[in-house]
Amino acid sequence: MIELRNVSKVYPNGARGLDRIDLQIDDGEFVVIVGLSGAGKSTFLRSINRLHEISEGEIMINGNSITKARGNELYRIRRDIGMIFQNFNLVRRSSVMRNVLSGRVGYHSTLKMLLGLFSKQDKALAMDALKRVNIAEKAYIRADQLSGGQQQRVSIARALAQEAKVILADEPVASLDPITTKQVMDDLLRINQELHITMVVNLHSVDLAKAYASRIIGLNKGKVVFDGKAAEATDEVFASIYGNQNHEQTTKQIGVAK
Ligand SMILES: Nc1ncnc2c1ncn2[C@@H]1O[C@H](COP(=O)(O)OP(=O)(O)O)[C@@H](O)[C@H]1O
Ligand SMILES: [Mg+2]
């Protein structure tokens, strides 16, 4: 369970990323965060695993404060949280297998990892993860030889090999074509349903949010302006999230047809 208690984030230059956010995300939820560019979506995700320090409040992960955690404790909390980025964040010149195995580094000593000593069990886990996203046959190919959609699946497999309990995905399909977008979103949904991994996904597209989310959180200027079931998110709700009463114009702006 992820709990944000009165969380605010102000950047050193004074920009407000998050404004007094109070909410809880339960295990197994598929949450989609929507909002205009600059609304605070990335700040929200990055604050959860403390890639960003928050300015105020506290974030709890399964009852442990990641805000206060230090050293090994922070390391252990983070191990349960996988992260997926728009640009995949793979080591492009390494094999797919190596990239997925890097999800295991949190479980071993630094020395072992420097020497690249992964166990049979690690390799089996990595291979299982690749099978789950249907790219096991690419295991020994260099990551940069794959299409964008395949690279994103490798990054999903890396989070699975990590045995993450939560996956945070920051605009995971923003650089993919519509067909690949559907495949990657379907992968995330299947993993959520089959493995009960909690998903928190930032998306630009309202249609995708409606199609995949069990819960939608709308951000505007760092504030939560909607938090409810996907079915409750009407056109009017989206218009208010996007700060525009004219729905036609809104849909045009955010490319709903994508
Ligand atoms: N590293 C940064 N330094 C200063 N301001 C930032 C930084 N990252 C984001 N911001 C500001 O914080 C606000 C939220 O940004 P962000 O979380 O990136 O929004 P989104 O992901 O929804 O586009 C914006 O006003 C943005 O300009
Ligand atoms: Mg962003």
Image: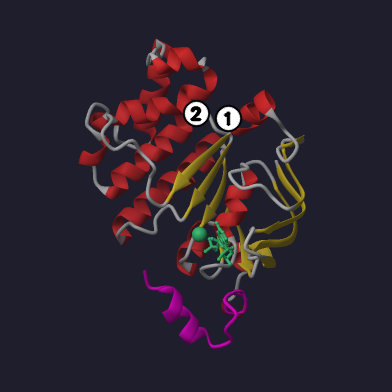
Q: Amino acid at mark 2?
A: Gln
Q: Which mark is residue 162?
A: 2
Q: Is residue 98 above or below residue 3?
A: above
Query: What x and y, as percent, mark residue 136?
Result: 29, 30
> Image point 47% across, 32% down: which residue?
160
Determine which residue is flagged by label 1: 79
Tag 2: Cα neighbours inside 10 Å, few (<14), some, or many (≥20)?
Answer: many
Quarter of the figure that contains the C terminus? bottom left
Judge whether residue 196 is colored magenta.
no
Query: What x and y, as percent, mark residue 250?
Result: 49, 81
The stretch of residues the image draws in magenta is: 237-258
Quarter of the figure that contains the N terminus? top right
* Element carrying mark 2: loop
> Image point 62% across, 63% down: which residue?
13
The part of the image, by quadrant, that contains residue 230 is: bottom right
Tag 1: Cα neighbours inside 10 Å, few (<14), some, or many (≥20)?
Answer: many
Quick check: 139 left or right of 158? Answer: left
Please state the quadrant of the image where ligand 1 appears.
bottom right
Q: Which of 41/247 is in front?
A: 41
Query: What x and y, as percent, mark residue 179?
Result: 30, 57
Q: Amino acid at mark 1?
A: Arg
- Residue 4 appearing in the image: yes
Q: Are marks 1 and 2 in contact (CB under 8 Å)?
A: yes
Query: What x and y, as percent, mark residue 198?
Result: 59, 42
